[in-house]
């Protein structure tokens, strides 16, 4: 069975994270963005209603959960509790594999993460907007 796509985005209006099933980039002009003092925005489709979010904060659910059963999204920072290392969750150029980058190009792929999931917890996210 195919898993439904899930996304997360941060709303400056509500100062909170919202979760939804799709999004699109809002076509604001540079002048409007400058006038309002905001960055590029996206509309996130949630179950209740669309929510305007920071485009840069939009992240896709990886389909994986950490040791605490928390969903792992693109942009999350994972803590390896065994080695005390942090990894940033990113998609590779082909969008097929999840990489947890540590520093430069070091990292583990999706399959290694799945095998070692009990050592990882979502620690933070790269946006740290809350």
Image (tube, rainbow, N blue to C red):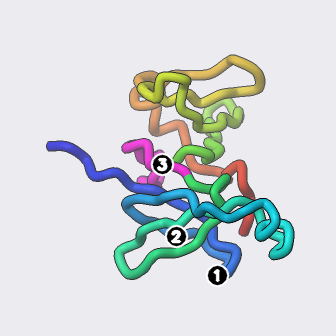
Occupied quadrant, residue 1: top left
What numbered label is drawn on residue 18?
2
Q: Is residue 6 above or below residue 79?
A: below
Closest to the observer, 30 or 124: 30
- Helix, strand or loop status at disc 2: strand
Q: CA distance from mark 1 to mark 2?
A: 9 Å
Give the number of marks: 3
Residue 85 image offset from top left, x and y in percent:
70, 33
- Whether residue 64 is in magenta: the answer is yes
Q: Is residue 98 above or below residue 28?
A: above
Query: What range is drawn magenta here?
Result: 59-72
View extreme (top): residue: 105
Q: Which residue is mark 3?
A: 60
State whether the magenta stretch is mostly helix, strand or loop.
strand
- Residue 4 position in % (x across, y down): 28, 52
| Front-lying residue, 65 or 37 | 37
């Amino acid at each position: 069975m195919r898993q439904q796509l899930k996304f997360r985005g941060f709303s400056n209006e509500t100062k909170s994270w919202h979760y939804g099933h799709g999004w699109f980039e809002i076509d604001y002009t540079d002048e409007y963005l400058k006038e309002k003092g905001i960055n590029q925005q996206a509309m996130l489709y949630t179950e209740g209603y669309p929510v305007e979010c920071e485009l840069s904060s939009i992240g896709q659910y990886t389909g994986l959960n950490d040791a605490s059963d928390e969903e792992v999204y693109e942009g999350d920072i994972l803590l390896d509790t065994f080695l005390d290392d942090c990894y940033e969750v990113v998609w590779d150029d082909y969008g097929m594999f999840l990489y947890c980058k540590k520093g430069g190009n070091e990292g583990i792929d999706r399959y290694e993460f799945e095998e070692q999931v009990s050592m990882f917890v979502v620690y933070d996210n790269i946006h740290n907007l809350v």
